[in-house]
Amino acid sequence: MATDRRSARRYTMRLPLRYRVRTRNGVVYSGTGVTQNISCKGIHFTTGEKIVPKGFVQLYLEWPVLSDGRPLELQIVGSVVRADEAGVAVRAVRHEFSRLASEESTPRDHPVLPGA
């Protein structure tokens, strides 16, 4: 029987997301996807686009819980540790929640990754 070596519990969540990736050679591209699971240390998602492993990524998820009646957005910064036909695995370095304006229903445009 295979043993799961993950150090953090993963939670199955299907949420739409937007991403921006900066590759090691400085190329920046963006796209959309759907989360498969999430933990305090990372996230796994699927997308129709090809993602380059070892790139830096910013993820933007509309969180399914409201704060004072306003939608929350989870922003995650991390690195792509694996990208294959099963999806994209990201190791989270930093995350934060922010409240979206009440009329916004999708994540807004965000600045490009620092250093890009």
Image: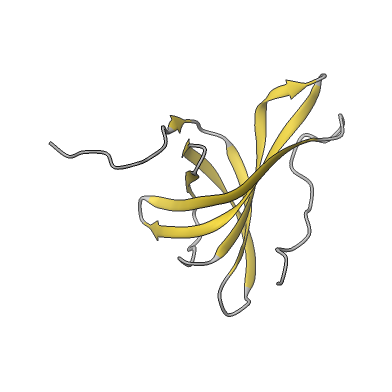
Q: Position of residue 26 (x, y in %)?
A: 63, 77
> Is the residue 113 above or below the residue 74 in the image?
below
Q: Residue at x 57, y 35 (%)?
A: 15
> Is the residue 24 above or below the residue 106 in the image?
below
In the picture, measured across the screen, residue 57 lies left or right of residue 67, that is left
Q: Position of residue 90 (x, y in %)?
A: 49, 52
Q: Position of residue 75 (x, y in %)?
A: 67, 45
- The quarter of the rendered structure image containing the C terminus is bottom right
Q: Outermost residue, bottom direction?
A: 25
Q: Residue at x 82, y 19 (%)?
A: 68
Q: Residue at x 71, y 71 (%)?
A: 115
**Number of marks in picture:** 0
In the picture, measured across the screen, residue 4 lies left or right of residue 17, that is left
Q: Position of residue 94 (x, y in %)?
A: 63, 49
When asked about the image quadrant of residue 73, the answer is top right
- Front residue of this view, candidates 80 and 84: 80
When asked about the image quadrant of residue 36, the answer is top left
Q: Outermost residue, left direction?
A: 1
- The quarter of the rendered structure image containing the N terminus is top left
In the rendered image, is residue 67 in sight?
yes
In the picture, measured across the screen, residue 70 lies left or right of residue 31, that is right
In the rendered image, is residue 75 in sight?
no
Here the colouring is: secondary structure
Q: Outermost residue, top direction?
A: 68
> Is the residue 67 above or below the residue 63 in the image?
above
In the picture, measured across the screen, residue 62 lies left or right of residue 39, that is right
